[in-house]
Image (cartoon, grey):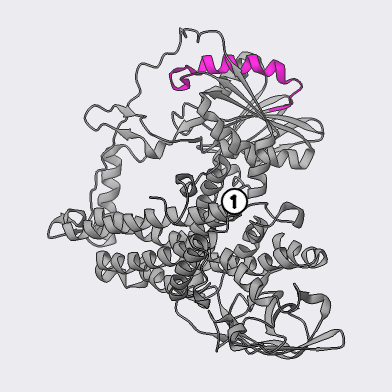
Amino acid sequence: MPLNIIVLLKHIYDENQLKVNQATGEVSFQGVPGKLSTFDRNSLEEALRLKQKSGGSVTTLTIGPQESEKSIREGLAMGADRAILIKVPNVLQMSANEVARIIINQLESLQPWHLLIASEGGADTYTSVLPSIIAQKTGFPLLSYLKSLDILEDGTVRGDRALERGIVTVKAKLPAIVSVVSEINEPRIPTLLQIMASTKKELKTIVLEEQAREDKYFKILSLSGKSKERKRIIFEGSAQESVPKLVDSLLKEGALP
Amino acid sequence: MVFPFKKLNDYEIRFTPEQEMFREFMREFAEKEVAPRVQFIEENDEVPQDLLKRMAELGFQGIAVPAEYGGQGGNQVTVSIFSEEIARVCPALTALIGVNGLFVIPVLLFGSEEQKRKYVVPIAKGEKKGAHATTEAVAGSDVAGIQTKAEKVGNVWKLNGRKAFISGGDIADYFVVLARTSPPPSKRERWKGLTFFIVEKETEGFHIARQMKKIGLKGSRIVELQFDNVEISDENRLGTEGEGFKIAMETYDHGRIGVAAQALGIAQALFEKSLNYSLQRYTFERPLIQYQMIDSYLADMTMKLVSARHLVYWAATLADQNREEYKFAASLAKAYATEAAEWAATKAINIYGGAGVITETGIERYLRDVEITKVYEGANEIQRLVIIRQLLKLTLGIDVTSM
């Protein structure tokens, strides 16, 4: 059956180029280039593969500033059919609840849709809560952290959840919300022809008139960079001598069960 | 102030957001899919089949070919972006892909509609490969000095001769081959009487004589081609009889920018590596970057790199605007960028010291790779001649050769 798929794309500050003040932990966004959140390319890739198999359409949905257009265009070049940008000035200061509320409001206008795909987390804040909040508020089934995903003939989605201690196979009726982990696929590189053709695709921009609401459960107090010093311990000697020392040390740190 | 141009805008370079996106994807491709294979390519003098296939599928063989002929609809700027980003990681791949352009450009510019359909489309789509055979052991930059002959017998041409240094000739399906079809009318008109032909690899009497060993660009092999009474139908004549010299020149004018961009990628790689190394490597308990002579090398490398980048994309921009001046700019860019890259390679070795000449660090490879860029598509000595001749032609309308 043809699938109408919605993919959440986020434009983020390139996390590899953030500058952190070592003394205060303050993060500087000045002059840091933006990019499409790394894992979102996996969700888009999965949507495009599903569409290639079953037909249908892929719509990307982004909440962010005007600069997000760069990432959205990348999604269109990869093969999304159309894109929606909901313009807000500072998405980093918005709570996940608020972002979820805006997305849910938008879902209505995208009916009929069958699958909403999100990534395992934003490559910037990596809160990973958005898909769960959307599912909880709308009542659609949630299949999270999938490392594989299939649409069955009876109109259900089945996937393998990649959890820390194993794999759980889950199944749900469409429409459903899924999140995928980055190992699910290798995102495609578009050709020059596809990149140029993407400029003709539809990008709908919606400017939210209302102010962002106060969130009584969730508030961002500060954004700061934490640097972690490595211990740099060297265990010398032969394997017979050094390995037990290493194990002792790991046990002391609580790094081994 | 703007001489030899007319206004400031003549120096303008502009990029579109799509070109920037293309650059970012090319960077990603080179880092993810090419970099891990470089050692294999280097050690085996061979590009893995799957990588060749992948590049063909991504449309690399037809970047500047119009979409109606199966290409990507790009232009000289996008070809340059591609060349630079790929060469930054593996200059040999730029050459290996670039030779398809040397087949495609003359066919697109001078070929018949049938020739374009039959030969350009499959190359642009990545199903076949092309190569360009002008150079001989006795004639390189001196195109008119070639000895290969074609004689017309009825409606068929008989080709005899030998071509040398043909990049990608070992894997190509189609070749454009330049031959002398009539003797030069006079010493001054040596360039007359040359004609291009399209030759398919299976044609009787045509074979690869031998592979030539070389330094640099491992993976992009060069061969000698032998033509013994190779019969070519007149349909496979490219352009009109006697038009060969002009076709060759037009082709190299375009190809030259690609070579300049290839050198630019090499310079970029060397600069990045040298800067990194200078920050990490300590000697006498201080990082290299604290030494003034090292900084002097790095600063000069930066100047040359940035200047080369402006020249390359400026020449490409002029070519895309169909400006006659692009040939002048292409020669500036080619000579400058290739020499800047070579200079950067020697200085990178100074900065790296012993680590610069062992193969593991990959620095010496760039030095070996860069050498041929000073030679092919017209040696840099020839470029300097072209620069002044073009300059006088464009500004004063003087033809130096007839003074």
Q: Is residue A102 left or right of residue B348?
A: right
- Kindly tell me whether residue B39 is visible in this rendering: no
Q: Is residue A46 above or below residue A238?
A: above
Image quadrant holding the C terminus of chain A, namely top left
What's under tag 1, amino acid-wise? Gln
The residue wearing badge 1 is: B321
Q: Is residue B145 above or below residue A151?
A: below
Residue A175 figure quarter: top right
Q: Which residues are magenta?
A: A89-115
* Percent position of residue A219, x then y: 41, 13
Residue A160 figure quarter: top right
- Which chain is indicated by disc 1? B
* Percent position of residue B47, x then y: 57, 70
Q: Is residue A232 above or below residue B147?
A: above
Callout 1: 10 Å neighbours few (<14), some, many (20+)? few
Image quadrant holding the N terminus of chain A, namely top right
Residue A166 figure quarter: top right
Number of marks in the rendered image: 1
* Percent position of residue A183, x then y: 56, 44
Q: Nearer the viewer, residue A208 or A214?
A: A208
Instruction: Tell me, yes or no, whether the highlighted magenta stretch contains residue A157.
Output: no
- Kindly tell me whether residue B12 is visible in this rendering: yes
Q: Nearer the viewer, residue A233 or B9?
A: B9
Q: Is residue B385 above or below residue A166?
A: below
Q: Nearer the viewer, residue A78 or B240?
A: B240
* Percent position of residue A137, x then y: 61, 14
Residue occupying the far left of the picture? B284
